[in-house]
Image (cartoon, helix red, strand yellow):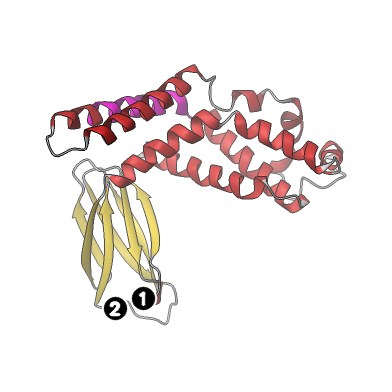
Amino acid sequence: MTSLTLYEHPLNEQVRIYLRLEYLLDQLDEVSGLSAPCHHIQFFRSLFDLLEILEQVQVKADLAKDLDKLKKKLNAWAHVPQVDQQQLQQLLEQLAEHQRAVLQAKRFGQALREDRFLTSIKQRFSIPGGSCSFDLPIFHYWLHQPLVARQNAINGWLATLSPLRHALAFWLQLTRESAQDGHVEVKQGFYQQDADGACLIRIQVNPDLGVYPLVSGHKNRFAIRFMPFDDDREVADNMPVFISVC
């Protein structure tokens, strides 16, 4: 059975930033334990992309506010008889831990911005091919350090991002789990729906249909146009699609 392809689309700017951060943090995790120079180059590119976002946006303050809003929502469930109170209490305790970690942390990325080595190579990474040995001899030197030394440095840099990583993952997990799933029939490649204060939609499509979604919308309404990947292929008149609104 063909597995469905999942697409996620944010319905506000804050969630757009969160998804980009998650994407970059996942890239860092994927290559951080690999040893080839090309993997290290990808690690630093993802790291500097992440730092660029953290320099432009006050993510710490925004995430702290969103965790507080989530806390109020969870507390509201405490008076609902059918709710598993033990699980609810565990979620509230986890949330409190993430809140403390976020509030006690420095501005996200501050320690990385103050790192002498990272500062010395960051600008050159914005130049195509700028990580060549003649452009960055200090980076070339680092690449030829023992693997354990390189790995220790990488682990240290990633550790400074732990409060962000864990709090963001927790918020996104609960947001995704709050989704209202729905199986819909898409007519002639177009679908629209009221969102009623939603912040994220998740679209699951069978890749055998040969289409991908283009989404436009905001917190109250969204529309999806399913486009054929191959120009010579027509979109089916009726397509089964799963759409979750968070």
Residue 132 percent across, percent down from the top left: 82, 47
Residue 128 percent across, percent down from the top left: 72, 49
- The residue type indicated by label 1 comes to Leu
Give the quadrant of the N terminus.
bottom left
Magenta residue check for 63: yes
Residue 51 percent across, percent down from the top left: 59, 34
Does residue 58 appear anywhere in the picture?
no
Kindly identify the residue that appears in the image at 44 percent across and 32 percent down: 167
**Residue farthest toward the left in the current orientation of the protein:** 81
Kindly identify the residue that appears in the image at 77 percent across and 50 percent down: 37
Q: Which residues are magenta?
A: 57-73
**192, 65: nearer the viewer:** 65
Q: Which residue is mark 2?
A: 236
**107, 55: nearer the viewer:** 107
Q: Which residue is mark 1?
A: 209
Q: Say few, some or many: other residues with alpha carbon within 10 Å of mark 2 (under 14 / 14 to 19 / 20 or more).
A: some
**169, 41: nearer the viewer:** 169
Magenta stretch: dominant secondary structure: helix
Indicate the quadrant where residue 97 lies: top left
Q: Say few, some or many: other residues with alpha carbon within 10 Å of mark 1 (under 14 / 14 to 19 / 20 or more).
A: some
**Residue farthest toward the bottom in the current orientation of the protein:** 232
> Disc 1 on helix, strand or loop?
helix
Q: Is residue 190 above or below residue 137?
A: below
**Residue farthest toward the front in the current orientation of the protein:** 86
- Tell whether label 2 touches label 1 (CB within 8 Å): yes
